[in-house]
Image: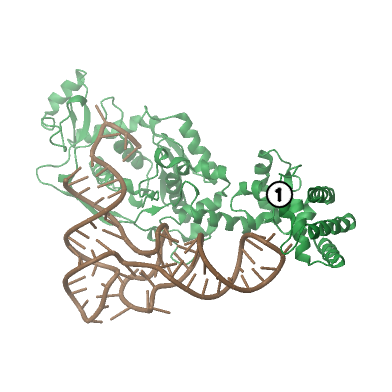
Amino acid sequence: MPRVRFAPSPTGYLHVGSARTFIFNWLYARRHNGTMILRIDDTDLERNTEQSLQSIFEGLQWLGLDWNEQYRQSERLDLHQAMAQSILDKGLAYRDFTPASEESTVGWLFNPGQREISREESDRRAAAGESFVLRYRVPRDTPETVRFTDAVYGEQSKSTADIEDFALLRSSGAPTYHLASCADDVDLRISHIVRGQDHLTNTFKHVLIFQAAGFPAPQFAHLPLLVAPDGAKLSKRKHGPVVSVTTYRDAGFLPQAFINFLCLLGWSPKDDRERMTREELVSAFSFEGINRSNAVINFTEESPFDAKSLWLNADHIRTMAASDLALALKPVVEGAGYSSERLGLITPLIQERIKLLKDVLTVGDFFFVDELAPYDSAELIPKKGDAAMALKALEAAYTALETAEFAHDPLEAALRAAAETVGIKAGQLFEPVRVAVCGRKTAPPLFGTLEALGRDVCLSRIEGAVAKLK
RNA sequence: GGCGCUAUCGUCUAACGGUUAGGACGGAGCCCUCUCAAGGCUUAAAUACGGGUUCGAUUCCCGUUAGCGCUACCA
């Protein structure tokens, strides 16, 4: 049974790239009946914030992603210390007493003179309270090749001649990311490390740590990065709120559509499927489907969301049950201060016309407002018609609607009949009526709209239109 | 700079030596139609470059170029 982990450091909001990493881990765990672990990598005390942690939980909760076990690295410092100690005892690490201000600028691999300090002297100086950084003693005399196999990137190797004596413990005694991460991966019996490709080269250091500690390394699967259209990795400072998961939630993405979109970035089911349910994703997921080049998430200043994410969201919206959609729309409508009472009638009318949940407020505003936004009376004039025709159409429609049964088919019959009696084309009658009740030319299908609006609203809006024309 | 990784339409991707290089989004056009959508059909659009290997390279190897990542007592 695989055991995988998502290990965010709480130093910002939940990033879309992090969300994707979580999802891939989660899919793998689900696919193989494994265990999903959330581990908060908070060893950098200075940069962690509680707010960030909340934002991570908030994002994951919105996405409906769960986990089986949860840990916090800052509560496991003893474990990290123990691993550091064991590596030191094996002679595979050494204390570096170089003050931070005097770090060597010439040799980047290690600070001169420190590797040679005897264990006795090192112990004595440490006991005397001299501060030090514990560094991994990377083999120097005869370079070795560090190897591992990545499930995505294949065989990887790097010479120890190109790996610096990296830190395991800071002068504060706190473990570095590399040490804490490996110690916890061992202790939590992580079987597969699935993380961003930015860790690919770090992995050589991790392999060294696992070796030194005497444990087999987990399997690795690195994920291609998500980058901005300019090729740079997504950053809030540079690219704005599009990098935060909550932005997508607030804009009206459906969690399952957003997950679907993220999965298609850097992974493919290898067939032509695009729209997939969570279950389909779980059963199709494999490391073989992950590709190796960075994926651009496309957005611009004007349209902040990738066109494909919008299309996928719209597709999920129009294929879900109208009742479920109404439920999803309810908080959006109520949040804008409107009544959600007639949503049952309205939802089917806008279902295939909105891309984002919040579009209900623009596409369907006229369903909710008491007073229509002002519009130009010229809008009321039908194609190949004039004001007189518009007036005639509206008056005929008014009369018809006074008595018609307010349901789709009867409404259509009544209006078509009305058009015929006054001798204008049905389409030419529908146009002014649509503008009169919706306040604009493009709107959902007319008869359903009239039905959802109800007789009183329709009649008074037509009355208002007639007044505008006179 | 050193090391590592990557390179197919604008974007996301398929093609694990032999295809007219496929699909999707977006674009263009047509159809359907009470407007808008949705849907259907059609269309433009790609193997970074140069060498090999091979009967045959998008696919394997080398180089160039470009991009990204790592190079912290951040993760």
Helix, strand or loop at label 1? It is: loop
Q: Residues within 10 Å of mark 1 (few under 14, many from 20)?
A: few
- The image quarter containing residue A188 is top left
Chain B is shown in which shade?
A: brown
Residue, disc 1: A376
Residue nearest the viewer, comparing A192 with B64: B64
Q: Chain of mark 1?
A: A
A115 relative to B7 in the view: left or right: left
Q: Residue A298's x, y, as percent?
A: 44, 52
Q: Amino acid at mark 1?
A: Asp
Residue shown at 32%/38% (left/top)? A183
Q: How many marks?
A: 1
Closer-to-camera residue (A305/A458) = A458
Chain the render paints green: A
Residue at the spot x=22%, y=28% of the render?
A: A133
Q: Residue at x 57, y 50 (%)?
A: A254
Residue A283 seen: yes
Measuring from the top left, give residue A217's x and y in whole percent. Answer: 29, 47
Camera-side residue: A215 or A304?
Answer: A304
Q: Nearer the viewer, residue A121 or A225?
A: A225
